[in-house]
Image (cartoon, grey):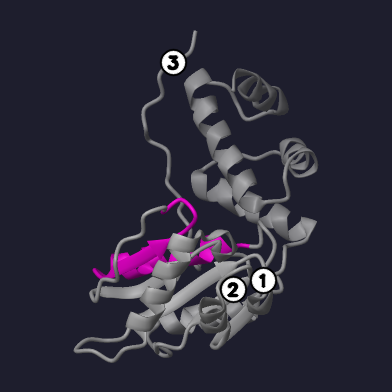
Amino acid sequence: MKQIALDIGVSVGPSLGNFHPGHNAAALAHLELWMAGRTRSPVPTYLWGDQGSGKTHLLKAVAHHVEQQGAQVGWMDKAVTQPQAFNPAWEVLLLDDVQQFSAIQQHMAFNWFVNAATPGAGRQPWVLAAGSLPPQDLPLREDLRSRLGWGHVFQLHLLDDAQRREVLLNHAQALGLQLGPELLDYLLSRFSRDLGHLISLLEQLDHYALQTQRPLTIPLLRAMLDET
């Protein structure tokens, strides 16, 4: 019989501190300088790379940092089907998975760009966007595509197996978990290379282990997957 686990798990959200740079050190340094307040300007930044390279992680890390400072963030991804109008109070505009934007989303994203570039009474918001393709190859309207590519552009590269292993071990440690080598090897060899997916799976397994009062093992992972 399962026990109901109290919600006492440690929440480890995206931050620049828990982003493993690998070959992406230049992009990470750029974002760190911006968040430290030393390079804040309306010049946009665009990150591109394969799924699992950390684009969404970095955008959410910036959003969390800005909100922790008491400022507001404008966010748009494919799930925001009815984006809101530009808000002058926004400190940063975050556009994720831009290659999947609908015509309505593209229109609003362009509107955000225009407003962000218009000098006003307050500070001009920064635009940080991400997609799976370089700017010139994005299937978007030309005026939006050109704006995404006129500032800083960084390609993000996937981590290799050793780096992905280190990220999972560090995340498990932050959650207070004992992640054995057999389970770690199983996760890395049987599931998606997308680190976001692997981390989500690890966190689900943590909750399942609390509910069933069992240690983290390969049989426990299989049991959890059989129930989903």
Residue 64 vs 41, above or below: the answer is: above
Q: Earlier in the sequence, mark 1 or mark 2?
A: 2
Q: Is residue 15 visible?
A: no
Viewed as shown, does residue 177 lie left or right of 39?
Answer: right
Nearer mark to the viewer, of 3 and 1: 1
Q: Amino acid at mark 1?
A: Leu
Q: Earlier in the sequence, mark 3 or mark 1?
A: 3
Q: Tell me, yes or no, if residue 137 can be seen here.
A: yes
Question: In terms of secondary structure, where does tag 3 sit?
Answer: loop
Quarter of the rendering containing residue 122: bottom left
Residue where numbered disc 2 is placed: 47
Image x and y of residue 81, in percent = 42, 52
Indicate the amino acid at tag 3. Answer: Gln
Question: Amino acid type of disc 2?
Answer: Leu
Q: In the structure shown, which secondary structural element does the residue marked by tag 2 occupy?
A: strand
Where does the image place residue 198, in percent across and percent down from the top left? 64, 45
Residue 24 forms part of the magenta stretch = no
Local crowd size for mark 1, using a 10 Å CA cut-off: few (<14), some (14–19), many (≥20): many
The residue to which callout 1 is attached is 156
Give the residue pinned by disc 3: 3
The quarter of the displayed image where residue 80 is located: bottom left
Q: Disc 1 and disc 2: Cα gap in Å?
A: 7 Å
**Quadrant for the C terminus in the image:** top right
Of the pair 22 and 63, the residue shown nearer to us: 63
What x and y, as percent, mark residue 32?
Answer: 48, 79
Question: Is residue 66 within the magenta segment?
Answer: yes
Q: Is residue 95 left or right of residue 25?
A: left
Mark 3 neighbour class, 10 Å CA radius: few under 14, some 14 to 19, many 20 or more: few
Q: Nearer the viewer, mark 2 or mark 3?
A: 2
- Region in magenta: 54-80
Q: Closer to the camera, 120 or 228?
A: 120
Work out whether 57 lies above or below 91. above
